[in-house]
Image (cartoon, rainbow, N blue to C red):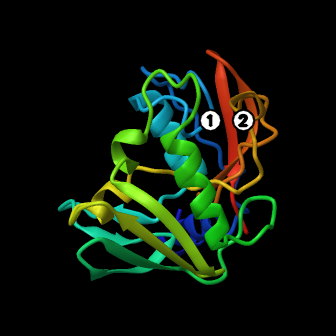
Amino acid sequence: MPRAARLLACLAFLAAPAAAQEIRLGVELFPNSLDPHWHNFGGNKGFAAHLYEPLVALDAQQRPTPALATAWTATDSTTWRLTLRPGVTFHDGAPLIAADVAHTIARAANLPGSPSSFAVYLRQITAVETPDAATVILRTAAPFPLMPVYLSQVPIIPATGATTADFDAGRAAIGTGPFRLTAFARGDQVTMARNDS
């Protein structure tokens, strides 16, 4: 076959439509709940990272970087002011607002029956204020310079009042993360689809 014909044959394959994209993963630690605040352990946190986002992320050097919050400032020794990223929506289309953050902090710090709570990341917070939809003010009893690092560990959820049972049934597993939940069978499989919102 002449060289030009081989080249054209190869290029023809490049023009073919792409096949559906699917990734299947086997995991060692399966989540015991889809409630992102139920159990602070590897299996749950690993899956939660696909469905939910924190206010602050950590880069490869473990330095705080923007996630759902675009800015955080210590306005005095016991006050942090956070600005939420504009235009963020949950998987159901609802906008992310400061009330969602206040709800998340209250819930994650005090979730009844949690075998390993997220309170360790939030116990320094004594008050949460939401002066407007895009601003969250966190007050602490003492100076706490690690606040941005600790906030990177807490997935933000909508303020719907959902229970752990609602999350595990798939009714409340709604976040802002890169994927949305499509099915959950405890101990068997979790199915997600790309979040296009």
Left or right: 98 with respect to 69? right
Q: Label 1 sits on what residue type? A: Asp
**Looking at the rendering, which quadrant does residue 141 occupy?**
bottom left
Q: Position of residue 194 (x, y in %)?
A: 67, 55
Please tell me which residue lies in front, 4 or 72: 72
Left or right: 36 with respect to 80? right
What is the count of numbered marks?
2
**Residue annotated with mark 2:** 167
**Looking at the rendering, which quadrant does residue 92 occupy?**
bottom right
Marks 1 and 2, the one that precedes in the sequence: 1
Please tell me which residue lies in front, 148 or 175: 148
Q: Measured along the vertical axis of the image, is residue 164 above or below residue 29?
A: below
Looking at the rendered structure, which numbered label has been put on residue 108? none
> What distance separates the C-alpha of mark 1 from that of mark 2?
5 Å
Q: Residue at x 79, y 67 (%)?
A: 94
**Residue annotated with mark 1:** 35
Q: Position of residue 45 (x, y in %)?
A: 46, 38
Q: Label 2 sits on what residue type? A: Phe
Q: Residue at x 43, y 68 (%)?
A: 138
